[in-house]
Image (cartoon, coloured by chain):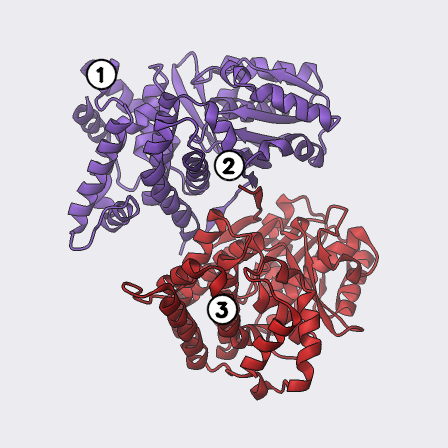
Chain colours: A red, B purple
Amino acid sequence: MNINKFVTPEIIFGGHAIRQAGDACVRLGAKKVLIVSDRGVANAGWLEKVMELCKESHLPFATFVGVTTDPKDREVEQGCQVFVQHECDAIIGVGGGSVLDVAKAIAILATNGGAISDYEGIDKIKKPLPPMIMIMTTAGSGSEVSQFSIIVDSNRKKKMTIVSKTLVPDIAIIDPYTLVTKDSSLTATTGMDVLTHAIEAYVSIAATPLTDVQAKNALILCAQYLRPSVASKTNTEAKEAMAMASLQAGLAFSNAILGAAHAISHAIGGKFPLPHGEINAILLPYVMDFNFIATPKRFLDIATCLGIDTRGLTEREAGNAAIHFVKELSFDIGIPTRFREVGITQEMIHHISEVALEDACMITNPRDMNVEQVKQVLKNVL
Amino acid sequence: MNINKFVTPEIIFGGHAIRQAGDACVRLGAKKVLIVSDRGVANAGWLEKVMELCKESHLPFATFVGVTTDPKDREVEQGCQVFVQHECDAIIGVGGGSVLDVAKAIAILATNGGAISDYEGIDKIKKPLPPMIMIMTTAGSGSEVSQFSIIVDSNRKKKMTIVSKTLVPDIAIIDPYTLVTKDSSLTATTGMDVLTHAIEAYVSIAATPLTDVQAKNALILCAQYLRPSVASKTNTEAKEAMAMASLQAGLAFSNAILGAAHAISHAIGGKFPLPHGEINAILLPYVMDFNFIATPKRFLDIATCLGIDTRGLTEREAGNAAIHFVKELSFDIGIPTRFREVGITQEMIHHISEVALEDACMITNPRDMNVEQVKQVLKNVL
């Protein structure tokens, strides 16, 4: 019996939970907070909402809204400059995975110094971070509860995976009403990211009963609610369900870590400006097929959670049904099914495979992978 | 959609996890730690083990082993004196629920002063507590992860329920190997406490999907492993399963709170020196029967988790089957089934009922209760 750890932030979730942002930050002892966000979130009104809440709590603030999709190291440096110039002592991130990952990375540089690439890998952060409150507005990345931050190294054109228990925020705020401003395409790709988190966490070699139960419920919710959530901006039942799915998948993967789909996805995402959830969605069924022999029973469990009637099925049949389910779900919500549709070619495969093998997420994949096996998965999905 | 909170300590679990005690305490910045325990745990060797671990981590310590079952306010005061005299700045609790509850209560007095009765009820603690590490050795109370401390007011002969988010320890250590020193009677009563936590948390009005999944897995594990765990001190598979059940039930009830069985149990436990888990076990089926109409679907879920084939059953039939299961489990592991067997009489019922209605756990019971209804439940179980 191995020793396992389970770490979560304080979680505040529910309708209008965002209203607690200012008070929560004051409760953590903040005197001046840096609010990190991006243009899309600002346009949707959520940045202004958080600024108002800080004013109501008499909490001075500075803002940094220079975060882009697949955020770069230089954005982290710029944000850190604002943090230092304004003498901030706490950070609020309000946005999707990119924003929250940058907010965390700013926290790293603020107290640990150096370049963000110094912290790539597992447990490289030595000094405590300033208090962090993360307000999730996409129901996807799970960054609001996770020990991960993913930042692009612009020289190496590579997504760096930074993993450390100290990256778990102090407080995560999940307010399903913030999801109604997402368009259907973003709902689809972030939703498939949630599904990928749940499946990879459930078959991870670091899975525990504490993470399993969260991963399984996330699967049940994705299977039932992702399609209706993509179909309608105002289906609040579906938004609430997907917010919970994202949260539960986040708790699962933050503690069980991920697998080959994310490792390969990070390698691709560093080079191609594709939505992270879309890359995951394209890869996931092929990685599931590769991983099946490592843990057939768990793929049967996944099929059951996805709503497949597995009575009388062999584990292989149930696994195949689960893979088919994932493909069909992707198709239904308008996600491409092949990498050639998004511009990846045969020539790029070798390099992508080598980079993927170095990613921290590969360590917990349930089946060992060598470069030829990564290449074969990528060839299957071209 | 209500706003909910979910708070947990950092959790370290697995075989020999106890070995991390000293280093974990140093990591929290401790300079001198008070180790709280009791005679039984000391005799089993676990106190000495923790003292050795502190020495290895070069962490000075003082000890307080004056905790008894159903711990009293004066024990908390004595422990706090030791904390102050030795200028401690952190607390390790090593033991069962009584020890951990006293360790938490010492932490309250150490930084907040006053009498422990000042903090009875919900959210009465104003100042931050010293770092707390809780090492669980009974697989029962869930105190190692919960926001509860239960202390007897010796004047009023009443169990005080103290509930506050700040009582969630910083680090919880769960080492299933510590359970092999428990005798079968303690395994039985603490195991039924776990089952009661899981059931009351699952039907609580404050239950959320985050607590539901933990409660349900705790039920599955109790149904499968409590009997074999009582049967054999050395069945490590059963010990591991019950340690996980206790942990998951603790995560569930700490965040969903409990219900009428615990409220009544606290009222009885303040007056009768009976094991807390035994009182819960006797009450539980009768409280389930009373609560059934509040949430029939959830009682059907409970039956399913207990391993009952609920296909074709009505919710009422499934609920009855779950109640029967609990009675049979109690009987199999040697727990009395009636309060008259343990000395409670008709004359005491009115007073017990009045005290129970004031307990903080009553607030989240799914069915409203008045004093006549509490009395009727108690009459049914005499």
Horizontally, residue A233 falls left or right of residue B287, namely right
For mark 2, does the 10 Å Cα neighbourhood hold few (<14), some (14 to 19), or many (20 or more) residues? many
Residue shown at 48% from the left, 78% from the top: A184
Q: Amino acid at mark 3?
A: Met
Check the picture and name the quadrant holding the N terminus of chain B. Answer: bottom left
Where is residue B169? Give x, y as percent: 57, 34
Q: Are marks 1 and 2 in contact (CB under 8 Å)?
A: no
Indicate the secondary structure of the residue bearing disc 1: helix
The reply to whether residue B176 is visible in this rendering is yes
Q: Is residue A326 above or below residue B40?
A: below
Q: Quadrant of the C terminus of chain B?
A: top left
- Is the residue at mark 3 from the same chain as the one at mark 2? no
Give percent across and percent down for residue A13: 48, 54
Residue located at (65% from left, 49% from top): A165
Q: Which residue is mark 2?
A: B145
Amino acid at dot 1: Glu
SS for callout 3: helix
| Circle 1 residue | B341
Does A174 sit above or below residue A282? above
Q: Which of the numbered marks, if any, corresponds to residue A269? A: none
What whole-number distance in Å separates the C-alpha atoms at marks 1 and 2? 33 Å
- Number of callouts: 3
Mark 3 to mark 2: distance in Å?
Answer: 35 Å
10 Å neighbourhood of mark 1: few (<14), some, or many (≥20)?
Answer: few
Name the image quarter holding residue A77.
bottom right
Q: Which residue is mark 3?
A: A288
Amino acid identity at mark 2: Val
Q: Judge left or right: residue A262 versus residue A208.
A: right
Q: Nearer the viewer, mark 3 or mark 2?
A: 3
Chain under numbered label 3: A
